[in-house]
Every structure is written in C-alpha cells, then in structure tokens.
C-alpha cells in the first residue's frame, strides 16, 4: 500500500506541506477543538508572560494529523518567540543537538517532532539542558576525558509524539506540561471544514461541510485534504459550487464511505472476516495475508478502526466486531448459541 497515495492517511504528505502550512491557525482563539488543552495552555502561557519567563517545556502526544505541530507554532506566536523546528530522526549525532541548543536565544522555542525516535545518547544531552539550561560536553576519551559545561539561554522545548510509551521516563518527567490530543467531534470537524473553505475562498453549504466532516475520520488534516479534492471535483465535474449532491459524488468517486473507511480499511476487515472467520488472529498472520507491513497495520490502519468500534484487540489477536460485519453487509455471526443475525 502506498501511503502517499492514500487520501485518508493522517500523516502529512510531501506534496501538501505548503498547503497544510497555509491553513494552520495562528492563535489559540483561532484553533478549533481541544478545549481543555486550550484552556490550560492559555493560563500557563499568560502566567509565563506576566513573569517574563519562557513557558515550561511541553509534550504533545496523540495520533497524527490532530494538530500537534500547529499547537507548537501557536505557542510560539502566543509567547512572541522564535521557533526552531527539527525531528527525532534528524538528530543523528550529539553535535547536531548541541549546535541547535547553543544557537538558541533567550525565550526561543525548540520543537522536536517524533521525539520518541531520538537516539538515547542524544536524549541524555537534553536532561541538563531542560533542567539547568546547561550543555555538558565530553572532551577526550578514556581516563583523560573531561566534561565541559556550557551555559545556555533559557528556552522552551516542545516535543511531539504519536507513541508516548516509547519515550523514556526520565525524559517524560522533565516536561512541565503533557497534553493528549484526542480525535475531534463532528461539530468541531464541521467548523474546521467551513474555516478551511473560507480560507480557500470556496463557498460551502452547512450540509456539505458536514458531509466532508463525517468522512474525515475525525482528523483535521484529512478533512483539509478531502475538501481540496472535493473542490477539484466540483470545478471539473460541476460549476464549482460545493452543494451536497456534488460533494456526495466526489466522495463516492474517492471510495470513502459514510463512516470514513476507504478501500484499504474495508480490505483489512473483509480479510479478517472472510479468511479468518472474524478472528481472533495474530497481527503477524494478518499482515502476511494482506501483504502489508506490521507497522503500517498497527500505526496507520488500526487506530481508526479501533476508535470507530470495527476492530478489537484481544490477548489472542485481532477480532472483527459485529459493527464491522453490519457495515460491510455480512451476516452477524452466531454468539452464545444464538441463531445468526441477518443484516
């Protein structure tokens, strides 16, 4: 499966980086959804500004596409601070991180995306930097090695991750605030679609915005991507207006059903039901049957199916739920010696 070609993948695609950037809200007031996070952020950012101090280090975690990077940039704007952006995989050597840290100015923000993928040796350099605003550099090797401590300007580290369980306890404990971004509600998604349509100067009806929101897997990045494709469809196949008829036609052409499942999702569920009688089946066996990578199934496909109640994880393996049978039009299997239910 080519994730770059899959419209419902929550990961950012290379071709849409500029598009994604242009749609990001600039302030907390513009940011739609995550009300508890916004409330807490607003309070502690205001308090830090009143004390004329950098805000505490922040860790943002949750599924991709929900706004972790956007929130990092919002924090930098709210604090009137410059932001330096990097990622865990990009920090290959201790020197890479040391160069970034020593070039930060007072109050700057360092944003590390995919912080869980950072090398453990590099992670240890962050400990004194986050706690004491100091950088310990080891000079020499063996018995003659000595440590040189460099003072750093006070800065804020913002880390983002989709796998908080992979972050070590010592690093996690050094963040002053940890926020979990959850999937968005339908009303919030509808508001996001309408905001994006307004930024793109595309008139859209309330019902049409809700149609796009319903099939966006409760993820803003997917909603923006779908709206862009629907706009193109309306321009070529219609008169450019995003009424409910043209939006439905566009979404059908994209093979996205009313629950937001695409053909890849349906293929996983069909394989589970048809080849393995609905499970339970081990992830390795399911991945082999689908000719997919285990990481793709676990990190990209499964989260939404679990969230929507189409899939269960059990100690014995993955199981298709009754909702999956009903959604795909299969007879619901007999449970506890009851006769099978028809759809």
Image: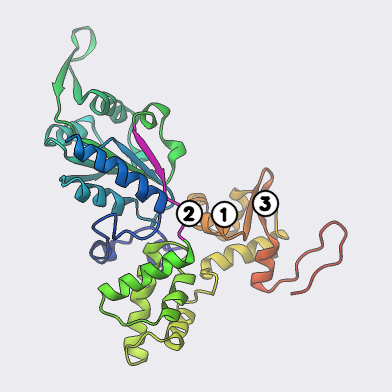
Q: How far is mark 2 from mark 3, CA to CA?
A: 17 Å
Query: Where is mark 1, residue-wise?
Result: 287
**Is residue 176 visible from the viewing direction of this image?**
yes
Whether residue 183 is in magenta: the answer is: yes
- Name the residue: 67% across, 65% down: 323
Q: Residue at x 37, y 71 (%)?
A: 193
Most common SS among magenta residues: loop
Q: Is residue 331 magenta?
A: no
Q: Place residue 102 in its image quadrant.
A: top left
Disc 1 crowd, CA 10 A, few/some/many (<14, 14-19, 20+) = some
Q: Quadrant of residue 316?
A: top right
Q: Residue at x 78, y 64 (%)?
A: 333
Picture quarter with the C terminus? bottom right
Specify the segment rendered in magenta.
Answer: 175-184
Position of residue 288 relative to residue 123, above or below, is below
Query: Disc 1 on helix, strand or loop?
Result: helix
Q: Are marks 1 and 2 in contact (CB under 8 Å)?
A: yes
Give the structural element (helix, strand or loop) at label 3.
Answer: loop
Sequence-wise, the earlier of marks 3 and 1 is 3
Quadrant housing residue 172 = top left
Residue 52 in the image: x percent, y percent?
16, 36
Disc 3 + disc 1, Cβ < 8 Å: no
Q: Residue furthest top?
A: 143
Labels 1 and 2: the sequence-earlier one: 1
User: Disc 2 marks which residue?
Assistant: 296
In the image, which disc is placed on residue 281?
3
Left or right of 56 on screen, residue 168: right
* Residue 99 drawn above or below residue 186: above
Q: Residue 93: x percent and y percent?
A: 24, 33
Q: Is residue 243 above or below residue 96?
A: below
């Amino acid at each position: 499966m080519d994730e770059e070609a899959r419209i419902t993948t929550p990961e950012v695609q290379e071709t849409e980086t500029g598009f994604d950037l242009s749609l990001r809200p600039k302030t907390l007031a513009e940011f739609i959804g995550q009300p508890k996070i916004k409330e807490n952020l607003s309070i502690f950012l205001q308090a830090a500004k009143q004390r004329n101090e950098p805000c505490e280090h922040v860790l943002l975690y949750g599924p991709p596409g929900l706004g972790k990077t956007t929130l990092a940039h919002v924090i930098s704007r709210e604090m009137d601070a410059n932001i330096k952006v990097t990622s865990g995989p990009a920090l290959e050597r201790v020197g890479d991180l040391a160069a970034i840290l020593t070039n930060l100015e007072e109050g700057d923000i360092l944003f590390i995306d995919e912080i869980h993928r950072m090398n453990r040796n590099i992670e240890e350099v962050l400990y004194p930097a986050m706690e004491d605003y100091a950088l310990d550099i080891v000079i020499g090797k063996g018995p003659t090695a000595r440590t040189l401590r460099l003072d750093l300007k006070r800065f804020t580290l913002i880390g983002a991750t989709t796998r908080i369980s992979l972050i070590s306890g010592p690093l996690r404990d050094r963040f002053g605030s940890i926020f979990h971004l959850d999937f968005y509600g339908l009303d919030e998604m509808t508001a996001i679609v309408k905001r994006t349509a307004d930024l793109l100067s595309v008139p859209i009806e309330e019902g049409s915005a809700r149609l796009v929101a319903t099939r966006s897997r409760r993820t803003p990045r997917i909603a923006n991507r779908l709206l862009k494709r629907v706009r193109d469809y309306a321009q070529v196949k219609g008169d450019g207006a995003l009424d409910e008829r043209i939006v439905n036609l566009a979404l059908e052409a994209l093979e996205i059903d009313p629950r937001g499942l695409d053909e890849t999702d349906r293929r996983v569920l069909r394989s589970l039901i048809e080849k393995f009688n609905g499970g339970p089946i081990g992830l390795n066996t399911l991945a082999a049957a689908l000719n997919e990578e285990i990481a793709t199934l676990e990190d990209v496909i499964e989260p939404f199916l679990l969230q929507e109640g189409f899939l269960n994880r059990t100690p014995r393996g993955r199981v298709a739920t009754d909702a999956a049978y009903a959604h795909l039009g299969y007879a619901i299997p007999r449970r506890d010696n009851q006769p099978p239910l028809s759809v």
